[in-house]
Amino acid sequence: MGIETAADERLADRLAELRLERGWTLEELARLADVSRSTLSRVERAEVSPTAALLGRLCAVYGRTMSRLLAEVESAPARLVRAADQRIWRDETTGFVRRSVSPPHGSLRAEIVEGRLPAGADIAYDRPCVADLEHHLWVFEGVLELTVDGERHLLGPGDCLRYVSGTSRFRAPGPDDARYALVVVEP
């Protein structure tokens, strides 16, 4: 089954452009991202949508946050972004839903992302997308277990954790979905 939306097709095109801008073959990118060549090929041809973990690996290789990469496939952000116009991305494998509340722009140092992780879902990022990014994670609903560089934090509604980018694992132990805001600040 192929990707369904024009934005997803633009994402596939942008991922291919980033690889070609660096002069990398699919084999080289596969080695750098530790992802199979065939998976990368299918993503770049818009045959499949990347999972959050895969997109995280590619962002790490390209030195971009996920929000910045997703914003690159959209037009320049407006000063006011209505809820109905905020970019939503779904990881069909885990059920993770990511809303770019304030799309990043080259002149801005911070962005706000809303995440919803279904109960039982677990996403691991084996490397940070961009080193030294400051994060403020604020839980609205449910319980979120966040492990950063091996240190586990169990967060409930109202809890806020500040951390600097590293390897991370997001898990919603349940019984309810975890909904949170993540503010990412560039150094």
Image (cartoon, helix red, strand yellow):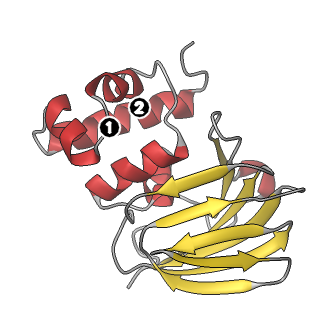
User: What number of labels is visible?
Assistant: 2
Query: Is residue 76 among what the camera can see?
Result: no
Query: Dot 2, crowdedness within 10 Å: few (<14), some or many (≥20)?
Result: many
Q: Position of residue 167 (x, y in %)?
A: 43, 67
Query: Where is 122 relative to 141, above or below?
Result: above
Q: Which of 150 and 161 is in front in this view?
A: 150
- In the image, is 86 to the left or to the right of 131? right
- In the image, is 140 to the left or to the right of 19? right
Query: Where is 22 relative to 176, above or below?
Result: above
Q: Which residue is drawn at 72% across and 76% down?
A: 154
The disc at residue 69 is none
* Element class at badge 2: helix
Q: Where is residue 120 in the image (x, y as percent from the top left)?
A: 76, 49
Q: Which amino acid does label 2 sit on?
A: Ala
Q: Mark 2 points at which residue?
A: 12
Query: Where is 171 relative to 18, above or below?
Result: below
Q: Position of residue 140 (x, y in %)?
A: 84, 72
Contact flag, marks 2 and 1 (Cβ < 8 Å): no
* Element class at badge 1: loop
Q: Residue at x 84, y 57 (%)?
A: 174
